[in-house]
Image: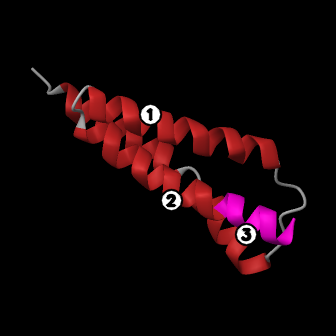
Amino acid sequence: MINPEWIGYTAGLFTTTSSLPQLVKVIRSRHTQSISLWMYVFVVCGAILWMTYGVLINSPSVIICNAISLVTSSLILAMKLRHG
């Protein structure tokens, strides 16, 4: 039987890496006008809540994947606030 944590890590890999192309583009171009401020506010809040949930249920995959998402999304949000 497959350990459910491995499914969580796999799902987290896809979800976490989905923001990397946007982050690279924003860092290179400093252009954030077409990025939604509210989307990244909600994504950052969601990642914080998912990490909290992961801690409460003791799920390393939920904690780690959302910690990485929090970092990447927070960087995009910071760039939006700075250059938007």
Q: Residue at x 78, y 62 (%)?
A: 80
Quadrant hosting residue 60: top left
- Residue located beneath label 2 in the image: 71
Q: Marks 1 and 2, Cα distance to the nearest angstrom?
A: 13 Å
How far apart are labels 3 and 1 at the CA level?
Answer: 25 Å
Secondary structure category for the residue under label 1: helix
Q: Quadrant of the N terminus?
A: top left
Indicate yes or no whether the magenta region holds residue 39. no
Is residue 23 in view? yes
Q: Residue sitting at 74 percent across and 41 percent down?
A: 39
Of the 4 image quadrants, the one containing the C terminus is: bottom right
Alpha carbon separation for disc pair 3 and 2: 14 Å
Which quadrant holds residue 26? bottom right
**Mark 1–mark 2 CB contact (< 8 Å):** no
* Residue depicted at x 44% and y 33%: 50
Q: Which residues are magenta?
A: 76-84
Whether residue 2 sits left or right of residue 69 in the image: it is left
Q: Which residue is mark 3?
A: 26
The crowding category of the residue bearing disc 3, from other C-alpha atoms within 10 Å (few below 14, some 14 to 19, many at least 20), is some
